[in-house]
Amino acid sequence: MKKNIVKKFMYIASITATTVIFAACSTAKTTSKGNQATGSIIKIGENMELSGAAGGYGQQQKQGIQIAVDEINRQGGIKVDGKKKKIKLIVKDNKTSNNTSASVAAQLTNNDKVSAIVGPATTNAGTAQIPNITKAGVPSVSPSATDPSYTLMKNGKTQKYVFRACFQNNFQGNTAAKFVSNNLKAKRVAIFADNSSDYGTGLAKAFKKSFSGKVVDTQYFSEGDKDFNAVLTSFKSKKVDAIYVPGYYTEIGTIIKQAREAGIKVPIIGSDGMADPKLAKIAGNSNASKIYYTTPFSAKAASTSATAKGFMKEYKAKYGSEAPTFSALAYDSVYMIKAAIEKENSADSEKVAEGLAKLKDVKGVAGNITVDSKHDPEKPIVVEQLTNGKVSETTEIK
């Protein structure tokens, strides 16, 4: 009887020990973070607004991403452990939907096992994916999410897996205010901002805070608005020296057209949301003079850069038009990931995140890129001027 009890006890103990061992192994597997890159390819995901309200920007970024991937693959790929591995690009449309963006991020990280993600284009869609990429330990580089808090947690600490290739709103707004004061010598300015997203309202707030003159009035419009005449007439009566219009070309093109038709001839200044050839088409070339906007990429300013010239030539050959800002930023985003992988000599997603945080002087189309402690890029910013719908002058703001 005693022998049987002892045997039974020993059996249960051995089973328990085995269970603990396997449980420990299982726990070790589930707690290991990040996607491990194996084989001869490196998977990079694209979570992008290819349709919906921001589809125009997403399509431009898709083009820039594709040029970068094709170029890298033609050169043999990304070097890891002395061998070159080609990129496999996995493209998904988040449809300018926050919920879809979160779902796409989960698919790319958990099912496709990507090493990094390019996108989304907008701050809201980008923010929606953060919980999923953080849980998976996979970094993303947004070409154009500009809200200052995008790369930061609520406590002010930097999001480990969130990076961007563009300037944040505060920097653009401050730069525009400096340009309006110092270069245009304007003393009385009206602000007409897009309040459909944090983009327009954030830029307006930053401009107002930095402008040394007087902001005589602040008004807002929404995405899809068509008639701006009443607000523009009120600005005209206030004898403004300039109008600051942070927003996107879709509405600002119409604002410019209606302003000029109302006899308002003062400079109109905005941000990189205006940096698209469609702006002049909507406004009309004859109306698009004395128009200025801050931008991280200027084809005219970049014409002396071998990297930028190569990109612009490739873009023109592939798509038949001049390269827009958003394509350039997306192209640079891919090269930031490439530089991070080669710096760490690993395409494991955790290592890619570490490499992105350490980037210094990476050659980009929009200038050399160094990533700061908040995962923002340090690089030049310029103001482009339109005359009769064409870029006539660029000014670098330091």
Image: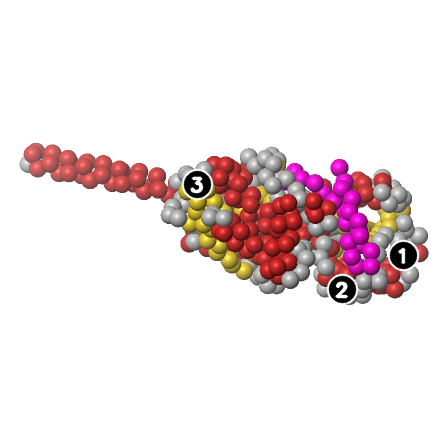
User: In the depicted view, which residue is nearer to us: 155 or 336?
Assistant: 336
**Is 376 in the magenta?**
yes
Sequence-earlier tag: 3 or 1: 3
**Res 62 visible:** yes
Task: Using a 10 Å C-alpha cutoff, classify the residue at mark 2 as few (fewer than 14 neighbours), some (14 to 19) or many (20 or more).
Answer: some
Name the residue type under label 1. Answer: Lys
Quadrant including the C terminus: top right
Name the residue type under label 2. Answer: Lys
Q: Where is residue 9 in the image (x, y as percent from the top left)?
A: 15, 36
Quarter where residue 369 is shown: top right
In the drawing, does residue 64 fall left or right of residue 242? left
**Is 243 in the magenta?**
no
Task: Give the residue displayed 49% in from the left and 54% down from the top.
Answer: 89
**Which segment did they paint magenta?**
374-398
In the drawing, does residue 124 fall left or right of residue 25? right
Name the residue type under label 3. Answer: Val
Query: Mark 1, mark 2: which one is toward the viewer?
Result: 2
Q: Distance between the residues labelled 3 and 2?
A: 46 Å
Q: Distance between the residues labelled 1 and 2?
A: 18 Å
Q: Position of residue 6 (x, y in %)?
A: 11, 34
User: In the depicted view, which residue is nearer to us: 193 or 78?
Assistant: 78
Q: Mark 3 points at which residue?
A: 80
Q: Residue 281 carries which label?
A: 2
Quadrant including the N terminus: top left
